[in-house]
Image (spheres, rainbow, N blue to C red):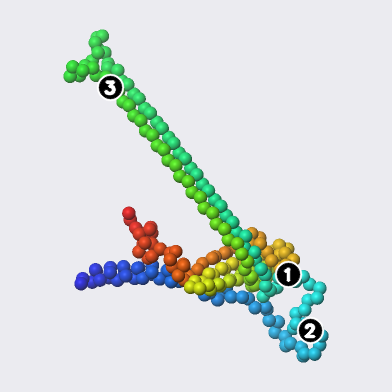
Amino acid sequence: MPPIKSSLRGFAIAGLLALAGCTSSMVHDDAQWAATAPTDTGQAPPADGSIYHDAQNMELFSDPRAHRVGDILTIVLQESTQASKKATTSTSKTDSVALAAPTLLGQAATLGGKAASNALNGKNAFDGAGSSSQSNQLTGQITVTVSRRLSNGNLVVRGQKLLTINQGQELIRIAGIVRPQDILPDNSIASTRVADAHISYTGRGSLADANTQGWLARFFNSKWMPF
């Protein structure tokens, strides 16, 4: 086999394997989404026997809502979006030009025994229409931890929830910035109050595989398909 054809075949096989690998890596285990532990003060815990000490973290007169690194916060998912777009275009143009035959000494000029008059007619029409609509909805709850406290008091939160049901797994991840004053007394906050929110809902398993196009179908529907 010529070396050029062998190289082309090798590139083609590598591309197909890359496309096939996309279906098996829908959910990634990422350490950056792990729960954030409370900040360690580095102080040795006091001896047991006292009624109250700092290591127990019993804040008798403070707000129980999350406000420190490592605190737990529940985000209520209330995402609902709907968008629609419609466009219609219609154009029409008609042209008509008539040139009478010139006269010479009172007689109409002729060409080949026919009057030398001309007429031009043109007509152009275009009609176009398009519409698009999309709606999404995501409800539920996910509990996250505070990963960082900003200088203005806002809290950077992140977390994930992994559900394994029968032959499939569902992974929900969320990250964003919340204001302490938006946190409700039950230590929860609506997802619509999370700034710079990054929400992902993915899955893997038999149901996800059955609902995913194969690598060959994705190739024919990709931008690399010239037809």
Residue at horizontal 45 percent and vertical 44 percent from the top: 130
Marks 2 & 3, CB-CB < 8 Å contact = no
Q: x%, y% of residue 217? A: 36, 62
Asked which secondary structure carries label 2, the reply is loop
- Nearer-N-terminus badge (2/3): 2
Nearer to us in this view, 166 or 114: 166
Say if 202 sits above or below 135 in the image: below
Q: To which residue does mark 2 refer?
A: 53
Quadrant in the rendering for residue 123: top left
Amino acid under label 1? Arg
Q: Residue 43: x, y in percent? A: 72, 85
Residue holding disc 1: 65
The residue under the point 64% across, 70% down is 143
Please state if 76 lies on the left or on the right of 119 as rendered: right
Q: Nearer the viewer, mark 2 or mark 3?
A: 2
Q: Which is nearer the N-term, disc 3 or disc 1?
A: 1
Residue visible at 38% across and 65% down?
214
The amino acid pointed to by label 2 is: His
Separation (CA) of disc 2 from disc 3: 107 Å
Give the residue pinned by disc 3.
118
Closest to the observer, 71 or 166: 166
C-alpha separation, residue under disc 2 versus residue under disc 1: 21 Å
- In the image, what residue occupies the spot 43% across and 71% down? 24
Q: Badge 1 local density, few (<14 within 10 Å), some, or many (20+)?
A: some
